[in-house]
Amino acid sequence: MNFQDFYHPPQKIPYSFEIFPPKDEKGAATLFQALKELSVFNPIFTSVTYGAMGSTQDLTRDLALRIQKELQLRTAFHFTCVGSNRTSVREYVERLKQEGLNLVVALRGDPPNGVSHFIKQEDGFLYANELVTYLREIGGFSIAVAGYPEGHIEAPNKEIDLINLKRKVDAGADIVITQLFFNNRDYFDFVDRARKIGIKIPIIPGIMPIQNLKQIEKITKMCGASIPRDLHQQLIQSDGDVQRALEIGIQHAREQCRDLITRGVPGIHFYTLNKSHSTRRIIESL
Ligand code: FAD
């Protein structure tokens, strides 16, 4: 299975859902319920993140396999270079391939809190393009990589970051999934610039319906995405009113999706935060 097979205009717009491994059984039950509710939209795949600092290596694998087996949803697994070397990467990914999972979101990952630079393991990888090259060498995978419409937080500028994205594409990535963004202009500008430097593969917009102010401020601070002033102001005014903040998030993401679809994006990747309500409401209204 290749990621590119899922994006074929002019079919119905394809959706994919991103989730993370829950901390406990209660979280797992909530997640499975959410995925059951979202499965009515026939997602092209559900992707399972890999915890910061490689902290969920086993959980990611077990959850991805469980979702594929129990819910019959096609699953992609995220994998980062954190704490891995060539031998451990090979062992991990070969095992998943044997279990029928060959869709990988290949990432570098982040340095630990308080450390400014990513440090590679001995015989490991410093950048995601090296991981992509190695996965191609192992063979049998289809590979998605991360793209940053507003530039990666560590990159000196957007142009250099885009050249680094091109390295991942040249190494063999099949699609790009973008970091969350709240202004579609950032996405379309990113796609234009990417096409100009010869990136031809599908660039799938990543949409995160906002759940509440505190959480989205934390997430955007960590990843360097910006919240438009109007949207931020609305969220500040709604602070304390959980339902109101949720509605603002739904409304904003819905408008973003409408515009993206009208302007011909190949698909939409939802950052669900393990919840179904907002994503379901948005897709139902499209
Ligand atoms: P890279 O592509 O390696 O880029 C990292 C930085 O180095 C960038 O500033 C880039 O410009 C620069 N760079 C890249 N290559 C080179 C080079 N060859 N020479 C010099 N500079 C270079 N994190 C997790 O921990 N787990 C997840 O499951 C996860 N899933 C994600 C899914 C998506 C769709 C996205 C957008 C992000 C995800 N992340 C995840 C976050 C990601 O790990 C971080 O953003 C990380 O800081 C960068 O990862 P990358 O793969 O983009 O790295």
Image: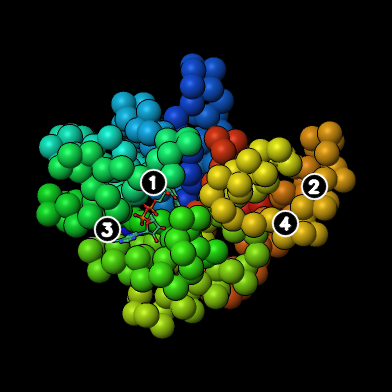
Residue 161 picture location, percent across and down: 42, 66
Cβ of mark 2 under 8 A from ligand 1:
no
Of marks 2 and 1, the one in the foreground: 1
The residue lying at 30 percent from left, 53 percent from top is 128
State the CA–CA distance, disc 2 to disc 1. 33 Å
Q: Which mark, residue 129?
A: 3
Q: Farthest residue toward the bottom?
A: 196
Contact between marks 4 and 1 (CB within 8 A): the answer is no
- Closer to the N terminus: mark 4 or mark 1? 1
Residue 142 picture location, percent across and down: 26, 55
Q: Which mark, residue 235?
A: 2
**Residue position for label 4:** 252
Amino acid type indicated by mark 3 = Asn
| Front in this rendered view, residue 159 or 143 | 159
Local secondary structure at mark 1: loop
Q: Is residue 139 above or below residue 35?
A: below
Local secondary structure at mark 3: helix
State the CA–CA distance, disc 4 to disc 1. 34 Å
| Front in this rendered view, residue 2 or 190 | 190
State the CA–CA distance, disc 3 to disc 1. 17 Å
Q: Is residue 168 left or right of residue 275?
A: left
